[in-house]
Amino acid sequence: MEKILHRYRRLIMFFLCSGVVGGMFYLYQDDFYKWSCEEESNSASCFLYAKKLLSEGQKEFAKNYFQRSCTAGYTASCAYLK
């Protein structure tokens, strides 16, 4: 009986930690994309952050991030610049 409870404790801890990490990523997703684009030069992050800015109506900032992404070789963002 004690082994079964020990197994469930591990499962509960796993789901709890996964939920916390997932929640943190959801809350700070935009900050992560912006950091990844600016500091790591991740072209896909620049593209995703630009799409987020575009949906919020910040076209000039979005164009800047689309340009960064296109320059880094992410071809899907080049279509948004035209």
Image (tube, rainbow, N blue to C red):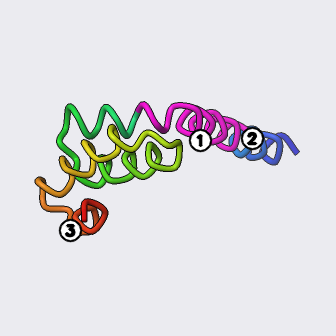
* Total tally of numbered discs in the picture: 3
* Type of secondary structure dominating the magenta stretch: helix
Q: Earlier in the sequence, mark 2 or mark 1?
A: 2
Would you say 58 lies left or right of 36 here?
A: right
Q: Which residue is mark 3?
A: 75
Mark 3 and mark 1 in contact? Answer it, CB < 8 Å.
Answer: no
- Asked where in the image residue 41 lies, by quadrant, the reply is top left
Which residue occupies the foreground of this view, 47 or 35? 47
Please name which of the two marks, 2 or 1, marks the residue nearer to the observer: 1
Q: Residue at x 27, y 61 (%)?
A: 77
Q: For residue 12, which numbered disc appears in the image? A: 2
- In this orientation, which residue lies closer to the viewer: 22 or 4? 22
Q: Nearer the viewer, mark 2 or mark 3?
A: 3
User: In what element is the residue under mark 2?
Assistant: helix
Is 23 placed above or below 69 here? above
Q: Is residue 43 left or right of residue 8?
A: left
Q: Separation of disc 2 and disc 1 at Cα?
A: 15 Å
- Measured in 3D between alpha carbons, the distance from the residue under mark 3 to the one under mark 1, in whole angstroms, is 29 Å
Q: Which comes before the other along the chain, label 3 or label 1?
A: 1
Mark 1: amino acid:
Gly
- What residue do we see at 33% from left, 40% from top? 60
User: Which residues are the magenta region?
Assistant: 12-31
Q: Is residue 24 left or right of residue 78?
A: right
Q: Residues within 10 Å of mark 2 (few under 14, many from 20)?
A: few
Is residue 75 or residue 79 the one in the foreground? 79
Give the image location of residue 15, x and y in percent: 69, 43
Amino acid type, label 3: Thr
Question: Distance from label 2 to label 3 (Cα)?
Answer: 43 Å
- Within 10 Å of disc 3 (Cα), the crowding (few <14, some 14-19, many 20+) is some
Q: Position of residue 17 (x, y in %)?
A: 62, 35
Q: Which residue is mark 1?
A: 22
